[in-house]
Amino acid sequence: MLRKQLSKNIVNNDKVIDHSVELSDDDNENNEDDEPALPKDLEHIPFVYKKPDVETIKIRAREFYQISNSRRTIRYFRPDPIPKSIIQDIIRAAGTAPSGGHTEPWTFVAVSNKKLKAQIRSIIEREEEINYKKRMGNKWTTDLMPLKTNWIKEYLTVAPYLILVFKQTCGTLPDGRKKIHYYHEMSVSIASGILIAAIQYAGLVTLTSTPLNCGPALRVLLGRPSSEKLCLLFPVGYPAVDATVPDLQRKPLSDILIELD
């Protein structure tokens, strides 16, 4: 799909700020359509908020950080089953993410069927072997060597659940008109981040997988429409008793935060 860059310069406090938005050619198909996707008379209601005291906020912020900081990428799982209701609540949490124009352009496919997981693994390992041997190149594979990754993905059949995240590039309105999904890439990325946080908060582990060159085959296997594109795959479960992780350290706050008081 051809892409074009739309840029708009806005003067703010005597400084020019460049606001660049990348749109597809298809996004302009309904430019003359003066009917919004949401109801014109959409009611706005009071926001109910009970302000916590500052100490409570501090405690909650610190607790959430500590839970998040214990998260690691896990490639070794136990096959122990997980109640479906837990996976459903995790995906409910992901579905609370903000989205452009309230389009909610995501589909989460939760797979626990063993035969289907084996088919997913077969597709991914076939493409990943080609990726590692040909497509990724020497630099990429060399950078991955310390992490000890390869094209064998046992976790795809061992983990009790696989969650595949699809982005909906467009939708359909009740009257059949095309519904534009603005910022679908960013919206789905935010939802995926919340998904990871929910998995961690629930006490489970996962791995952020990007099945390179596998999207079309997996979309067909899972019966998803052509308007959906695979973004990420998350195996979800409990870590194996003998699971190991690389001895890595995260950047300190001073390296990632710029404070302008």
Image (cartoon, rainbow, N blue to C red):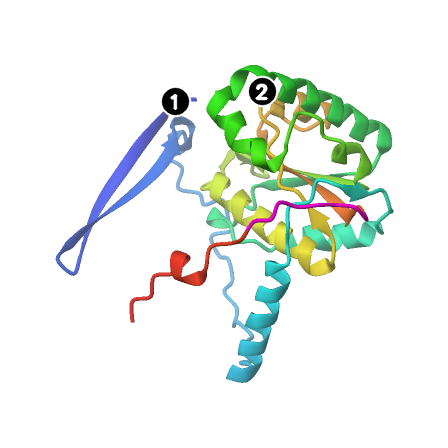
Within 10 angstroms of label 1, few (less than 14), some, or many (20 or more) residues? few
Q: Which mark lies nearer to you, 1 or 2?
A: 2
Q: Secondary structure at mark 2?
A: helix
Q: Position of residue 94 (x, y in %)?
A: 63, 52
Q: Position of residue 149 (x, y in %)?
A: 63, 32
Asked if 89 appears above or below 156 in the picture, the reply is below
Asked if 189 appears above or below 130 in the picture, the reply is below
Name the residue tied to disc 1: 2
Task: Check the picture and name the quadrant holding the N terminus.
Answer: top left
Task: Return the residue nearer the eye: 64 or 41.
Answer: 64
Tell me what residue is drawn at x 67 percent, y 56 percent: 200
- Residue 238 visible (yes or no): yes
Q: Along the polypeptide, which appears first: circle 1 or circle 2?
A: 1
Between the C-alphas of marks 1 and 2, the distance is 25 Å
Asked if 125 appears above or below 89 in the picture, the reply is above
Q: Amino acid at mark 2?
A: Asn
Within 10 angstroms of label 2, few (less than 14), some, or many (20 or more) residues? some
| Magenta segment | 241-248
Would residue 110 be found to the left or right of residue 190 on screen? right
Q: Which mark is residue 131?
A: 2
Asked if the stretch drawn in magenta spans residue 246, the answer is yes
